[in-house]
Amino acid sequence: MTDTTKTPDATLDAATTRNALPDARLTLVGTMHGPERARALVRRGHDRYTTVSVGDPISGATVAAIGEGVIVLSRGGRTERLSLPAA
């Protein structure tokens, strides 16, 4: 059984509305936690989605951690926090 982070209703609505999510390089869409590993669904650009795990490369960074509704990226010795869009 996997535990999932509740995705805010505003994020769910935005995910099905074209160009509603922020026009950023990366947007966190959701996080999933299972018995063996955590994963995150990330939007890259306008229409590209990918699932990542800790250690995966994405857009010049490495996924350092995945928490409930947040991922931490490591880029050039610095960390960046990517959270679900505000409701």
Image (spheres, rainbow, N blue to C red):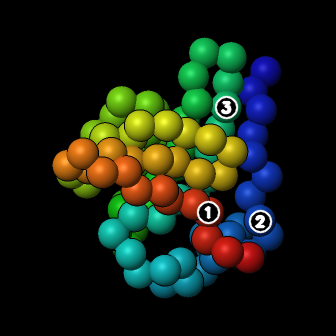
**SS for dot 3:** strand
At 46% from the left edge and 42% from the top edge, which residue is drawn? 51
Q: Quadrant of residue 84?
A: bottom right
> In whole angstroms, how far apart are the C-alphas of marks 1 and 3?
15 Å
At 67% from the left edge and 75% from the top edge, which residue is drawn? 86
* Quarter placement of the N terminus: top right
Left or right of 26 in this view: 77: left
Q: Quadrant of residue 38?
A: top right
Residue designated by label 1: 84
* Quarter placement of the C terminus: bottom right
Left or right of 57 in this view: 14: right
Residue designated by label 3: 33
Residue 41 circle label:
none
- What amino acid does circle 2 point to? Pro
Q: Is residue 49 visible?
A: no
Q: Where is residue 26? Give x, y as percent.
A: 39, 64
Please say if the residues under marks 2 and 1 sit with CB atoms less than 8 Å apart.
yes
Please say if the residues under marks 1 and 3 sit with CB atoms less than 8 Å apart.
no
Is disc 2 surrounded by few (<14), some (14 to 19) or many (20+) residues within 10 Å?
some
Residue designated by label 2: 8
Q: Where is residue 15? Give x, y as percent.
A: 60, 70
